[in-house]
Amino acid sequence: MSFVHDLGGVRGFWEVEIDPEEDHGFHEGWEARVFGLSRVIRGNGVCTTDEFRHAVERLGPATYMSTSYYERWLMAVEKIAIEKGLLAEGAVEQCLLELPDEHADEHDHADDRDHGAH
Amino acid sequence: MDAPRFKVGDTIRTRVDNPPGHTRLPRYVRGRTGVIESFRGVSPVPDDTVANGVRGSDVPYYGVLFAMQELWGKDAEPGAELVIELWESYLQ
Amino acid sequence: MSSHSYATASQPHNHDKDATRVALTARTAALEAALVAAGVLQSEQVDELVETYAEKLGPRHGAAMVARAWTDDAFRQRLEEDATGIIRDLGYDLEGSQHRDLPFATLRAVFNTPEVHNVIVCTLCSCYPLFVLGPQPRWYKSPEYRARMVIEPKKVLSEFGTTVPAGKTIRVWDSNAETRYLVIPEQPKGSEDMTEEQLRALVTRDSMIGVTVLPDLT
């Protein structure tokens, strides 16, 4: 068959969810930032657009189907940077620990998506 | 780069495969018969770019028209058709 | 809105949504910091990119193309034959703004007629003419839109409130490769005497993706 991102014609999805209040830009600040990171790494020659897309496709079926669009891009940027030897494994986690206080509480929520209470 | 193999109006059939790497030929149009809608240009094929790690030579690509019944069978939604863009290497 | 979206199981209530947003904001900041520390990029580059796509680009550019196509036959003809050439020569906003930092784009304008209704999708990811419409709406990137538009377009259009008359062909364009598409909606009846500037205000983003048509003016 194909990688799971190849969704044309796949059955089982429900109605398209349309938010009439939705505005025209990016919806979250972090999403805009991820978009920027993805474009800049390409512009800086780290990878081609084709390689970037394939990094998203290679996240694995369960991950692909349970994450939002820009969360996949966030993972793909990190994945490519590590695969290209530009970042060490764990470099991002290290930076999470070193972020200014307003982010510091959240480092242990980054991978814990079921956890609702702070 | 060779001259384009196909011209507008030609009937083509897409390749049948299941590549282990990147491709922009979705599974729902593999092994299907369609008609060349337009010659669109030339560029490197993404499958090769990712497999080889570098952009390759230019390959012609086309707009290709498919009837919905060709893609989904006799119960396909009537009154609809689909156009998708395919490099020559995607065509048999 | 559907009560049983595919995302129900992972769709958190608002408290969890906030936690997720905070976590993703933090991780994004951490990734950027790591990339800057590694010399891969500079934050100013990201700032500029975000500003371009969030502020300088938007559906008003596509609307300007549509309004001009409605009022200027020579422009319409060129838009049919060489939309890419138009944006190369006139800029994405038709006013010479080239945005030279943007990757060059291949554009095809597809015209709605009494016989054909065009609609755009990207089944493989979410390719879209950001350079003339700005960032994509959430639904365009959603798995349900990507999966269903190529197999049941009429049904999906009805979920947007769009009824395509019997006898009219729906032509779905899957943006899987180089070309990005801009739908040129039919000009609303009753708008024939409006100026190009007035017409621009009628053109919605969704009509240029093809999920809606522009209503006639009463």
Image (tube, rainbow, N blue to C red):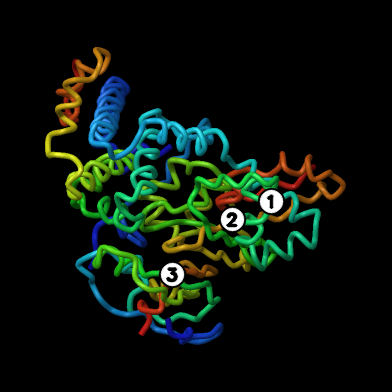
Name the kind of residue labelled 2 in the image.
Leu
* Residue displayed at 51% across by 87% down: B10
Mark 3 is surrounded, within 10 Å at the Cα level, by few (under 14), some (14 to 19) or many (20 or more) other residues, namely some
Marker disc for residue C65: 1
Q: Mark 3, chain letter?
A: B
* Residue displayed at 25% across by 63% down: B53
Pointers 2 and 1 in contact (C-beta within 8 Å): yes
Q: Mark 2, chain letter?
A: C
Marker disc for residue B43: 3
Q: Mark 1, chain letter?
A: C
Residues beneath discs 2 and 1 located on the same chain? yes
Q: Can residue C151 be seen?
A: no
Nearer to us in this view, B83 or C87: C87
Residue that label 2 marks:
C182
In the rendered image, residue C31, in percent from the top left (x then y), is placed at 25, 33
Q: Earlier in the sequence, mark 2 or mark 1?
A: 1
State the image quarter where residue B18 is shown.
Answer: bottom left
Disc 2, SS? strand
Q: Is residue C21 above or below residue C78?
A: above
Disc 3, SS? strand
Q: Is residue A118 above or below residue A113?
A: above
Disc 2 to disc 1, C-alpha distance: 9 Å
